[in-house]
Image: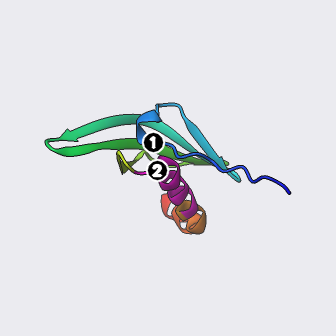
């Protein structure tokens, strides 16, 4: 019986600039991580990121992740969205 390797949750507080996540030819690169704290509310992490795909480099965009969320799942969602809309995004970028 083979064991499946399950990736552990990645809390947003563990993200740092320079971290990279890969899928196929796509690289999700973290540029900056800031924390916004509200009164009586859990912190929200603002993650500035850039997507690199072969010769394409996206402008910096931002992802808002709350303390209890899994950052890896959010990053995977962004990468999947980019892959699904790759042709449109790259043609719109010029």
Q: Nearer the viewer, residue 61 or 68?
A: 68
Label tally? 2
Query: x and y percent of residue 66 in the render?
Result: 34, 49
Distance from the alpha carbon under mark 2 to that under mark 1: 6 Å
| Residue that sits furthest to the left in the current view | 39
Q: What predominant SS class does the magenta segment belong to?
A: helix
| Residue that sits furthest to the front in the current view | 1
Residue of label 2: 70
Q: Is residue 82 left or right of residue 60?
A: right
Q: Nearer the viewer, residue 1 or 14?
A: 1
Residue of label 1: 11
Residue, x 32% and y 35% (percent of image)? 34
Q: Can you tell which mark lies on residue 53?
A: none
Q: Which quadrant would residue 13 be assigned to in this image?
A: top left
Q: Is residue 32 left or right of residue 51?
A: left
Q: How is the image coloured?
A: rainbow
Magenta run includes residue 74:
yes
Marks 2/1 in contact by CB < 8 Å: the verdict is: yes
Q: How would you rate the neighbour count of disc 2 (Cα within 10 Å): few for under 14, some for 14-19, many for 20 or more? A: some
Residue, x 53% and y 64% (percent of image)? 81
Magenta part of the chain: 69-80
The answer to whether residue 90 is visible is no
Query: x and y percent of residue 43 in the render?
Result: 27, 41
Magenta run includes residue 27:
no
Q: Is residue 29 left or right of residue 13?
A: right
For numbered disc 2, what is the local secondary structure?
loop
Residue, x 66% and y 51% (percent of image)? 6
The answer to whether residue 59 is visible is yes
Vertical placement of 1 versus 67: above or below?
Answer: below
Residue, x 75% and y 54% (percent of image)? 4
Vertical placement of 13 versus 62: above or below?
Answer: above
């Amino acid at each position: 019986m083979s064991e499946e390797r399950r990736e552990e949750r990645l809390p947003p507080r563990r993200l740092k600039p320079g971290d990279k996540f890969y899928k196929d030819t796509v690289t999700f690169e973290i540029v900056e991580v800031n924390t916004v704290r509200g009164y009586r509310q859990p912190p929200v992490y603002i993650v500035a990121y850039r997507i690199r795909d072969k010769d394409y480099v996206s402008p910096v965009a931002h992802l808002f992740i709350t303390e209890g969320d899994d950052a890896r799942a959010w990053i995977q969602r962004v990468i999947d969205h980019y892959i699904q809309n790759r042709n449109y995004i790259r043609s719109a970028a010029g």
